[in-house]
Image (spheres, rainbow, N blue to C red):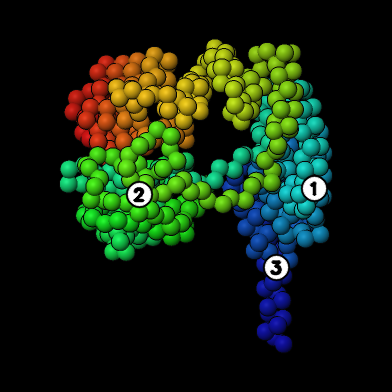
Amino acid sequence: MKDQRAMNSDETAKQTRCKRELRLVDQALQINPKSYWLWNHRRWTLESSPTPDWARELKLVDMLLDKDARNFHGWKYRRDVIANLPQRTPKDEFGFTTTKINQNFSNYSAWHYRSKLLTTTFTTAEEQQNAMQQDFEIVRNAVYTEPADQSAWLYQRWLLGKKPLPLAILGTCLLREDDRSALVFVFNQPTKITNPASISLTVDTEPVNHSGSLQSHYTPVHAIWLPTLPKGDEFVIAIEKDAFVSGSGGAFGGRVGRKVQLGDVQPGTVTIDPSHPIDSDPMTISTPETEDVVADARYQPPAIWSRESKSVEELVEVEPDSKWALLTLVYMMKEVTGRDEDAIRILEKLEKLDGMRAGYYRDLKSEFVLNRAINPPQQILASQTSPAESHTFTLTSVSLTSLPTSTLSNLYTIRHLDLSHNALRSMKFIEILPLLETIELEGNQIERVQGLGGLMRLRRVGVKGNRIRGVEGLRE
């Protein structure tokens, strides 16, 4: 009995101390409501309290958000409070964000919280789509009212969704140069090998040793080095499930193989993808494989993209210098084909309107310039039929500042590349072109030679007129 009374007394004393501490934090928050440590300390005090009053906390955070609806510390704390109030439903909170957004469209925290609540408030696909269509209308009202504020524009991007990109092997190449051999996998996005042992190679059922990939980071290209490659009729690659993983969470695995005469293959490059329209090398082992990906239920159909794009274009007619409206149009143009010229024109305008971010706009413009030059890649590559031009790609004097690997990896069969007289700052992108023999990069802004490690066939790198200083830039 005495022990119980002592325990009760201790609990009462602890509760009293916690209440006193909370009152102190109340006063401090009135002075500095955006102090990270005050909110952290308050959360710790509530969690340490024998009988925390979470309902009171909700009233407190309501009051503070009424004073400053964009206090992101308060919004974060609110989510912690709601997690301890089971009677408060996601629908209640969704309604709260509606109230705050209607009070002030320029409330990024409210839009962000809304994105977290929508899929839990509305559980069926039909309910979610209905809610999203209503939110598109709210966004349109917001951007017409405050076109210079980013909050609603970013929420609109979230509503439109991101098109799922299944992880796919674009091609597989067997490289044989002198006494070295390598099996190269080219993916449509950066991947990482989870375990080299998850890839097994056999020739006529006999295992072939390999040293795994040289690349330990995420990259679209992986080279598997083969110390020896015996003669045989059937070369089989077995890839365990999840052997390759992408940064977006995709995974790839499978078993591919064809009968070939390895002994008849001369040193050089052998492309294993028989569906490629321009390669006539004798060895074929695999066709492009793709991973099954569940489509993003939030990704909107083309009709919705078109509707929203038209709405933004109408706004641009009224607000021709609205940076967020123009940038949103560019974002939408990445989802449709045939708008590269329009996107380039808008980005050139943005360079003038927003000089502080001119570098970002130039990098983005480079993506559209490259896409315009290689889309669709099969047609351009297939048109280069003469021996001198075969597997050659030239894109000079177009002010390229960067090259996105997601687009460039489609040109993995390129052997001669000329990107002279642009504004490229890095040449690391060449590591995803495994068959490259020559590259011309004269007249760019490159400071360091890099990306050469796995290019077995590379014979020439032209870097005259760049910013390379001394041997440090040529260490590779």
Image quadrant containing the N terminus: bottom right
Q: Where is residue 218 in the image (x, y as percent from the top left)?
A: 41, 45
Is residue 384 visible in the rendered structure shown here?
yes
Q: Of the residues shown, which amino acid type is indicated by label 3?
A: Pro
- The secondary element bearing badge 3 is classed as loop
- Tell me, yes or no, whether the two marked residues, 2 and 3, touch with CB atoms within 8 Å: no
Disc 3 to disc 1, how far (Cα)? 43 Å
Q: Of the residues shown, which amino acid type is indicated by label 2?
A: Ser
Closest to the camera, between mark 3 and mark 1, is 1
Disc 1 to disc 2, how far (Cα)? 42 Å
Q: Which of marks 2 and 3 is nearer the N terminus?
A: 3
* Residue at numbered disc 1: 126
Disc 2 to disc 3, how far (Cα)? 49 Å
Indicate whether 333 appears above or below 283: above
Image quadrant containing the C terminus: top left
* Residue at numbered disc 3: 50
Indicate whether 13 appears above or below 425: below
Closest to the camera, between mark 2 and mark 3, is 2
* Residue at numbered disc 2: 216
| Disc 3: CA contacts within 10 A as few (<14), some (14-19) or many (>=20) | some
